[in-house]
Image: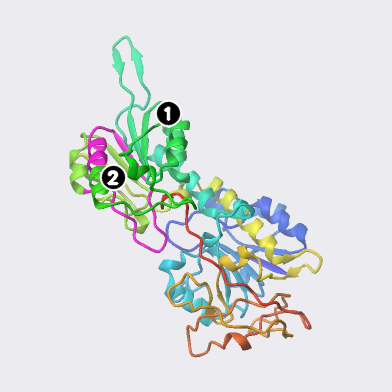
């Protein structure tokens, strides 16, 4: 079975979906792996290193994709235009990538019309069994670290306190907004550089995490705050009165610090504005803001994607794809996440794909299958329709040849085009005589960190 690793073609993407380490593992499974020429160059993985791991080097994208049963990518494939990556792909080809599904409905429609089976790594459920596949955590961890380094690069002062014969230099004061994975790593990194660090988060439970790393916790800690988290670990909606008190405290804090790192993201929605123009104006000249949510609209009202903007003598860092600025490590971690997920889809004895649609990780991650968008959390996905308990499915013939895959019955589908078939009649690609089983409905997973990265 062939696995394709193409070169990423979206702007600012420096990562690659496989490393020589994971290529070796896929070869050991019995797969044929083809890596497009230069795919790993931005991540310092050479073609020679991939060859040594057992991969074949494809001269271009078309060669790399030809006859592939599975395609591993970082960003979702480009649909349409001169760089179209899905044209000519075989029906039922499995595509694994970071799909950003909530903001990519048009692309998902195109994947569905091409009858691709696509999995969104950013939809991997946050459960214990899936921790080794959690790309949001692995990439956010690096983003939090790099945010501090990039902030320090434009900050015109030192981080640690220094006592010299010429006098004492006071330590920098850094304020982290959001104590999720990125925020906690930012705290740890800023502390290692010698800064005085404070942080805030909407969840009371985050106070202990923040303080365990040596930072002070900033929040209006009244009775309402103490009850601001559900039994499941999610943040509750706060009253307008509390929001006003908290906003005043945050504004007061921002005016006193040298650097602010913002990390708040909400799946499916624009990033919330945490730092207003007036707050920026209140900061000391030479201060720095690093906005990790800039690609989703930004947590700072004045941030600009892809650049460092200077407003009111404050440098606002809005670099795109922060994990990609550490391309080697980001690729290494991402490729391990992808390999661990791929193992769930692969039958080691048959040496082919065998997708168990009753597995909650697979159900929660699949976004398109058999001509339809199937994930219930997406805008026009319908509730699953009844499906027969068992059925015999046949081998699918495609434009690039027959792709044999042994799979269990796929999730029922939301109708996205006139060509989509009813769920009760859908047939998953499989080896002759394979049986399929009725899946249970998938549940969308939300983050338990108050929306922070």
Task: Say what secondary structure mark 1 lies in.
Answer: loop
Task: Say what secondary structure mark 2 lies in.
Answer: strand
**What is the crowding at mark 1: few (fewer than 14 residues within 10 Å), some, or many (at least 20)?**
some
Q: Nearer the viewer, residue 341 or 5?
A: 341
Q: Nearer the viewer, residue 194 or 279?
A: 279
Q: Quadrant of residue 156?
A: top left
Q: Main secondary structure of the magenta part?
A: loop
Q: Viewed as shown, does residue 352 lie left or right of 295?
A: right
Is residue 256 shown in magenta? yes
Q: Position of residue 361 (x, y in %)?
A: 61, 62
**Above or below: residue 98 compared with residue 383:** above
Q: Position of residue 416 (x, y in %)?
A: 47, 83
Whether residue 56 appears in this view of the structure is no
Q: Which mark is residue 448?
A: none
Q: Viewed as shown, does residue 152 lie left or right of 281?
A: right
The extreme top residue here reads: 165
Q: Position of residue 251 (x, y in %)?
A: 23, 40
Q: Viewed as shown, does residue 84 lie left or right of 313?
A: right
Q: Which residue is mark 2?
A: 316
**What is the crowding at mark 2: few (fewer than 14 residues within 10 Å), some, or many (at least 20)?**
many
What span is in magenta? 248-276
Cα–Cα span, label 1 and label 2: 20 Å
Q: Residue at x 33, y 49 (%)?
A: 318
Is residue 415 shown in magenta? no
**Above or below: residue 283 compared with residue 35:** above
The extreme right residue here reads: 349
Q: Which residue is mark 1?
A: 193
Q: Viewed as shown, does residue 376 lie left or right of 223?
A: right
User: Is the N terminus in the top left, top right, bottom left or bottom right quadrant?
Assistant: bottom right
Q: Residue at x 42, y 37 (%)?
A: 207
């Amino acid at each position: 079975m062939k696995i394709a690793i193409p070169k990423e073609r979206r702007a600012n993407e420096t990562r690659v979906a496989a490393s020589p380490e994971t290529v070796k593992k896929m070869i050991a499974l019995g797969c044929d792996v083809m890596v497009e020429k230069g795919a790993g160059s931005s991540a310092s993985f050479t073609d020679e290193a991939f060859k040594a791991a057992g991969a074949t080097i494809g001269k271009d994208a078309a060669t790399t994709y030809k006859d592939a049963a599975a395609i591993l990518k970082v960003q979702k494939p480009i649909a349409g235009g001169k760089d179209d990556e899905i044209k000519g792909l075989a029906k039922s080809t499995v595509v694994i990538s970071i799909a950003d599904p909530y903001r990519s409905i048009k692309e998902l429609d195109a994947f569905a019309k091409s009858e691709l089976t696509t999995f969104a790594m950013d939809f991997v459920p946050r459960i214990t069994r899936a921790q080794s596949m959690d790309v949001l955590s692995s990439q956010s961890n690096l983003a939090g670290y790099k945010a501090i380094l990039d902030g320090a690069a434009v900050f015109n002062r030192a981080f640690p306190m220094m006592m010299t014969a010429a006098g004492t230099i006071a330590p920098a004061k850094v304020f982290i907004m959001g104590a999720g994975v990125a925020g906690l790593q930012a705290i740890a990194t800023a502390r290692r550089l010698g800064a005085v660090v404070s942080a805030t988060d909407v969840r009371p439970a985050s106070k202990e995490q923040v303080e365990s790393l040596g930072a002070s916790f900033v929040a209006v800690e009244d009775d309402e705050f103490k009850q601001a988290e559900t039994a499941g670990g999610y943040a509750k909606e706060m009253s307008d009165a509390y929001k006003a008190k908290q906003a005043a405290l945050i504004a007061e804090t921002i005016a006193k610090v040298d650097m602010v790192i913002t990390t708040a993201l909400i799946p499916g929605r624009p990033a919330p504005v945490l730092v207003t123009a007036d707050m920026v104006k209140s900061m000391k000249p030479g201060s720095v803001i690093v906005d990790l949510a800039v690609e989703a609209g930004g947590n700072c009202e004045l941030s600009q994607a892809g650049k460092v903007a200077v407003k009111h003598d404050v440098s606002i860092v809005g670099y795109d794809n922060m994990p990609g600025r550490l391309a080697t490590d980001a690729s290494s971690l991402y490729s391990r996440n992808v390999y661990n997920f791929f193992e769930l889809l692969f039958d080691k004895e048959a040496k082919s794909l065998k997708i168990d649609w009753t597995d909650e990780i697979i159900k929660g991650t699949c976004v398109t299958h058999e001509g339809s968008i199937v994930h219930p959390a997406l805008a026009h996905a319908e509730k699953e329709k009844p499906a027969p308990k068992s059925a015999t499915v046949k081998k699918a013939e495609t434009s690039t040849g027959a792709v044999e895959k042994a799979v269990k019955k796929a999730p029922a589908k939301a109708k996205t085009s006139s060509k989509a078939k009813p769920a009760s009649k859908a047939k998953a690609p499989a080896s002759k005589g394979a049986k399929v089983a009725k899946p249970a409905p998938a549940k969308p997973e939300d983050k338990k960190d108050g929306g922070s990265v």
